[in-house]
Structure formats: C-alpha cells, structure tokens
Amino acid sequence: MNLITALAISIGALAAVATYLCLGTGLGLQVWALFIGWGAYYHTGGTAQSITKCAANHAWGVIVATVALFVVATVGGAVPVTSLIVGLSVVVLVLGAHLPLLATIPAAVYGYASTAAFCLLTGVAIGDLAASVPAAGMVLVSLILGNLFGFVSEKGAGLLVKPQQTAEA
C-alpha cells in the first residue's frame, strides 16, 4: 500500500476515535484543538521529537494567551488598548523562540490562537483566572492529545505501507 493511502486509513480510523473521545465521553476535550495539535505534529516533521516541540510550544502559546486575555479583561480597554495588549503579547510569544525549547513558533501560535478562540467564543470569564486557567488547560490537553494522535497515526501508517521492492539489475 502506498503512503498516502496508508495515512488516509490510519488517520481516518484514529479520527473516529478522537472524535468519540471528545464528543462522547464528557471529558471536555475539544475536537478542533485535538485536530490542530495533530496537524502541528505533522507540520513539525512528524517524528517523535515533534511531540516535545509541539507540546512545549503549545503550552507557551496557551500561557501567553491566557495572560494577555486576563490583562485585556483587567484593563477593560477599548479596541486600540486591546490591540496593543495583543500585539505586545505576540512580541513576547515570538521572543520565546530565543530559547531552543520554544523555537517552534507556529506551534506556539496554534496554542495562543486556540486559547483565545476558545475563551472568547465560549464566553469564559477571561478576567477570572479560576475560570480561564481550566479552560486554557483543556485546550492544552486537547492540543497535546492531538500531537499524540499524530504520532500514533504516523506509526499506524508505517505498518500499512508495503516495503518497497528493490529492483534487480
């Protein structure tokens, strides 16, 4: 079987499992964040090291976004003030890449954006850390679970790929 077909089967089967975990168990996992984490795994090379790269950078993005949202809620500013806070927080997000562990900027952005989207679109009280931290934590758990699903899907596809026959000269 070729690699694309193997990936399609592996990812499709695991997507059903992931969706059930998120929607059918009451764990609070977010299926969309899981899929973002899954894509991030492949985006960062699709190797075992991708899990660590993604997880650390997702966590960084989640932390920066949670702090930024808290500051926005605390300051209670108008759009220009909110825009400035977000801009400054993104500067901090990217500056984190000076540390080798936080050098996978796209994965940090996925964590930041996922956290902001979840908190803002679900109406989480961003000025209340007792509400926003658990919400952000669930986004992070979902992202990292997605990284792990990426790893498993890649290994599963590898099992389905037929070894290439070597041509005899």
Image: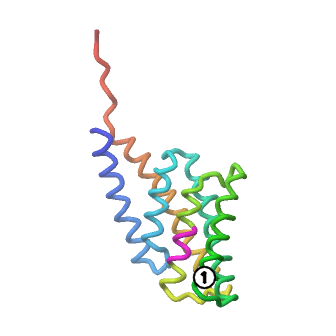
**Residue wearing tag 1:** 80
Identify the residue at image location x=64%, y=82%. 81
In this view, the residue in front, 149 or 62, is: 62
* Residue 79 in the image, given as x and y percentages of width and height: 57, 84
Task: Judge from the rendering whether residue 9 lies leftward or rightward of residue 87; answer left or right.
Answer: left
How many C-alpha atoms fall within 10 Å of the one at disc 1: few (<14), some, or many (≥20)?
few
* The C terminus, quarter of image: top left
* Residue 58 in the image, given as x and y percentages of width and height: 59, 62
Colouring convention used in this rendered image of the protein: rainbow
* Residue 146 in the image, given as x and y percentages of width and height: 48, 61
Task: Judge from the rendering whether residue 159 lies leftward or rightward of residue 71; answer left or right.
Answer: left
Identify the residue at image location x=69%, y=58%. 95
In this rendering, the answer to whether 98 lies above or below 114 is above
Quadrant of residue 165 within the rendered picture: top left
Identify the residue at image location x=53%, y=70%. 113
Q: Residue furthest front?
A: 80
Instruction: Label 1: state its secondary structure.
Output: helix
Q: Is residue 115 magenta?
A: yes
In this view, the residue in front, 86 or 78, is: 78
* Residue 54 in the image, given as x and y percentages of width and height: 57, 56
Q: Is residue 118 magenta?
A: no
Please, what is the three-letter code of the amino acid marked with disc 1? Pro
Identify the residue at image location x=31%, y=45%. 6
In this rendering, the answer to whether 41 lies above or below 80 is above
In this rendering, the answer to whether 74 lies above or below 147 is below
The residues colored magenta run 112-117
Q: Main secondary structure of the magenta part?
A: helix
